[in-house]
Image: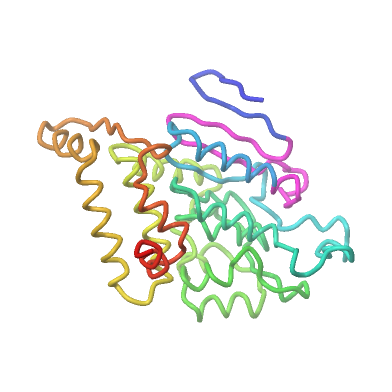
Amino acid sequence: MSTRGPGSVARVTYEQIAYEVEDGIATITLDRPEQMNAYTMRMHEELIDALDRADADDDVRVIIFTGRGRAYCAGADLSEGGAAFSAGDDLAMADYEDGGGLLTRRIFASPKPVIGAINGSAVGVGLTMTLAMDVRFVAEGAKLGFVFVRRGIVPEACSSWFLPRIVGVSQAAEWMLTGRVFGPDEALAGGLVRSVHPKEEVVDAARALAREMADGTAPVSVAMTRAMLWRMLGEPDPAAAHVIDSRGIFTRGRMPDVQEGVMAFLEKREPAFPDKVSSDLPDWFVRWLEAGSVSAFLEGERG
């Protein structure tokens, strides 16, 4: 159910998360405070739905994730005990997909910038889900940990791909192979988070950065740039970036956004970019994303 509250705040009702949009910023809040926002299948489904909702809304420019209460997310709900990580005997290995990985891949695919406002402790999937986000803020006193080897399992949520790219393989190995819990200062020193803030200020800090990303920028350019930054991490040579850069400059240079951006600069006013993410991403760009690599994209173009 969708409602619009005071001050033009749009809200959607869920069971285990909260979703609201204000001034172009969608805030997704993990909302099981009594359980320290422990991750459940229901929460997973609601997070995917909220991301779909935000991505389909051209008025949403940036997405912020945070939690309600004293924790961001205590990890997977372990109320089932040792069976918590069991997929069941009736499911074949080839058919099983890790839910955390489905979530981080969905965040990775978003055309909107995603910011993590880690308001309290985050361990396991509570921390790995934030790795697909573009920037992370963390609250003072938060306990953080990639604790998988201490639970007898392995890293999930595609974290073995994301974490080394964010902090380097040596730091990733130290955190993941020990499974130890560490604090905000170590997270900051290791490059995992942008900055540390008092708990009551962490969301405001995230919103301030979100405003910078949303105000005065072209939504289609932001969407393309986010994808280019993440996707080029897997390319072996800058020539791949040159291919996409060149096509991007060529096609965007002919779109109304560029005329508006240049004239707004010359006229010393705020731009009103007309192009929309939902309709104006270049066709070739979408094909590149679907191809998965520049080489596969070029092979498809050749035919």
User: In this rendering, would 220 be left or right of 42?
Assistant: left
Total numbered labels placed on residues in the image: 0
Q: Which residues are magenta?
A: 15-44
Magenta-span inclusion, residue 24: yes
Q: Position of residue 193 (x, y in %)?
A: 48, 60
Q: Nearer the viewer, residue 155 or 227?
A: 227
User: In this rendering, would 145 be left or right of 113?
Assistant: right
Q: Residue drawn at (58%, 79%), measured in percent from left and top?
A: 174
Location of residue 294 (image quadrant):
bottom left
Q: Position of residue 212 (x, y in %)?
A: 34, 42
Q: Residue furthest front?
A: 303
User: In this rendering, would 129 be left or right of 191?
Assistant: right
Q: Residue drawn at (58%, 45%), measured in percent from left and top?
A: 66
Q: Nearer the viewer, residue 124 or 302?
A: 302
Q: Residue furthest left?
A: 266
Q: Nearer the viewer, residue 164 or 290?
A: 290
Q: Is residue 237 above or below residue 127?
A: below
Magenta-span inclusion, residue 187: no
Q: Position of residue 276 (x, y in %)?
A: 37, 36
Q: Nearer the viewer, residue 218 or 247?
A: 247
Location of residue 99 (image quadrant):
bottom right
Q: Quadrant of the C terminus?
A: bottom left
Q: Residue furthest top?
A: 6
Q: Residue drawn at (16%, 33%), measured in percent from left and top?
A: 264
Q: Quadrant of the N terminus?
A: top right
Q: Is residue 69 above or below residue 169?
A: above
Q: How is the image coloured?
A: rainbow
Q: Position of residue 106 (x, y in %)?
A: 57, 52
